Every structure is written in C-alpha cells, then in structure tokens.
Image (spheres, grey):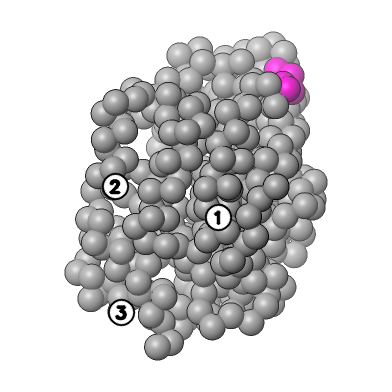
Amino acid sequence: MFPELKNDLLLKALRGDTVERPPVWMMRQAGRYLPEYMKLRDKYTFFERVETPDLACEITLQPIRRFQPDAAIIFSDILVVLQALGLEVTLNPGEGPRLPNPVQTSEEALNLTVPDVHDRLHYVMQALTLTRKELNGEATLIGFAGAPWTLFCYLIEGRGSKDFAKAKAFYWQHPKAAQHALQVISDTTILYLKAQIEAGAQVVQVFDSWSGLLSAEDFNKIAFPYLKQISEAITEVPVILFAKGSWYALEGLAHRTNATALGVDWCVTPEYARQAVGDNVSLQGNFDPARLLSHPDEITRLVHRMINRFGAQRYIANLGHGILPYVPVENAKAFFDAVKSWGN
C-alpha cells in the first residue's frame, strides 16, 4: 500500500541500532516560519488547513522539500481530540486556542464519553495516508496527540494559562469527575493513535506540554498513569513521550512505561538525561528554540556540542519545544545541516 521506506534513520535510532549520525527533525517544522506556509495561512483558516487532507499533506511536506529531515510530523493540532469529544475550539489570529464553553462542573465532566475517532477525526487519517504516499519513503512519518493532562488543562481552563490553576483546582475539588475526564481522554487518545498508525503513521509522539506545571508528586498522580496507559496500549510502532518541563519524571518514564524514546527540553542537561533513562530508551531534544536566532555558525557549533554531549547513539536531534514563528529560514536550515555534517 505504501512506498518502501528508504530513510529509516529515525527508526534505527529508536531501536538502538548503530547509526553514523543522529536522525533530525524539528517540532513544528511545518508552520509559521516558512513563507510558503504563510501563503496558505492567508488563504485558509487554521482549522480549514487542519481539516483539509490535501492542505495538511502539503504543509507537512513543505519542510521536507526545503531541508530533507529524517522525519515528517503530520500537520494537525492536539485540540482536535477535544473537538472529537464535542467541544468547540477556536483559533483566531493573535489570541491562541480558545474553548468558548469549557467544562465547568463535575456533571459536565462525568458526561464526557469516548467518541468514534474514525468518524470525528477522519480527516487526520486521510491526511496521514496521503502524506505517507507522497513522502515516497524519503522520511519517516510521525503521528501525534496531546497527553491527557495537557488536554484536561484546556478542557477546564478554556485557553492557555501560565499556571492552569483552574484545572488543578478542578482536579482536587472534583477528583472523580476529573479522573473520569482524564480516562475518557486517554481512551480516546489510544484509539486515535491506533487509527493514525493504521492510516500510515510509523512513529507516534505524545505531547504533555503542561506537565511541567505539576509537582513531582502531582505528576505521578495526575499525568503519569495516563502516559503509562498510552505507551502500553500502543504496541504497533515506537512511542515518543514528551513531558515538557518534567525533568524529575525522566527516570520513571524510562523505567515504568513502554516508551521507546523520551523528549527533553532545554532545561535538562544531556548528561543528567542520559543518567536518568539508562541505555534502553532513546532521547530526543533539547536545543533551545530561541538559540535558532543565533548566527548560523553559532548554531552549527551548538548543535555539534549537543550531539557530542548526548552521544550519537539512541539520540534524535530536535528542539526542546516547537520552532518559533520568527526564526529565519536560513537559521532553521543551519540546524538541519549541522546535524547532517556532524562527524564529518
């Protein structure tokens, strides 16, 4: 059904096979820093881009044409799962994601049920299948979803927040309702990721963007159980867990889940991350996206130093979070080129 994979460098790094250099891709590599993306942004709304398979495929392929990374990540959004659960999500220019009617009561949370992901999110699967064919084996295709805790934050808060205090308060004030909501999100996410894999995803990543707002103890109670469930349920392809800001959780995620790899942000040293996870889990990250605003020569130096500190094996070169919208294209290219030139 799909073309033969010609570039399996990412899969080798995830398996722990010996590689000559680390694979490289970039979170949010399809997006706002690319002029060709901006042209589509001016013509279509955000969710028109997400929900139109041809557009999502084209946007996913844009950085592949420019930089030839080792992986493509499908263009979509973590909040489509909340849409599938029946909530309205808006994303207007300049204001970020909004849920006009977030969950406010325990009764509303308890009424959440697992949807038919094939019906509600069919456009994501169609985009994955189309993209996998168009890639023609030149890069590994990554699917993704938001982690239950991160989606719960938006479900309750209705927008981004510095502390998501409402979401935390809801959990402690209505624990049974909160745990029901988190379980529904987790079950939905598992079905969604399995559908993505059937549609062509060769690796999946789970983004827990707001887990770093939890204490270590609260992380183990609120976030960890669902990340563990997801990693144990997805057995078809490698699973990358990225719990941003949760440096304290690396050891537990490495040894108590079935994750194939763990993402790390720029607040963790390579040495600490390696020591925490051991030899059986790959690492991904941790270049500070803001350092892409440095001179290209400095980017090259920093990237080579990062790889030297992590080591080339069981490592995936990436940012510690998504690329910023105002990074010059030539600086992004310097990042990719630096990884490819490492060791030469």
Quadrant including the C terminus: bottom left
Q: Secondary structure at mark 1?
A: loop
At label 1, the amino acid type is Asn
Q: Badge 3 is on which residue?
A: 301
Residue 260 in picture, x, y percent from top left: 69, 62
Q: Residues within 10 Å of mark 2 (few under 14, many from 20)?
A: many
Q: Is residue 253 magenta?
A: no
Residue depicted at x 25% and y 44%: 35
Judge whether 148 appears above or below 66 on screen.
Answer: above
Q: Residue furthest bottom?
A: 344
In the image, taking residue 331 as reference, residue 240 lies left or right, namely right
Residue depicted at x 58% and y 80%: 19
The magenta stretch spans which residues?
A: 112-116
Mark 3, mark 1: which one is toward the viewer? 1
Residue 193 in picture, x, y percent from top left: 68, 41
At label 3, the amino acid type is Arg
Residue 342 in picture, x, y percent from top left: 41, 82
Q: Badge 1 is on which residue?
A: 136
Query: Within the image, what quadrant is residue 153 found in?
Result: top right
Q: Are marks 3 and 2 in contact (CB under 8 Å)?
A: no
Residue 259 in picture, x, y percent from top left: 70, 58
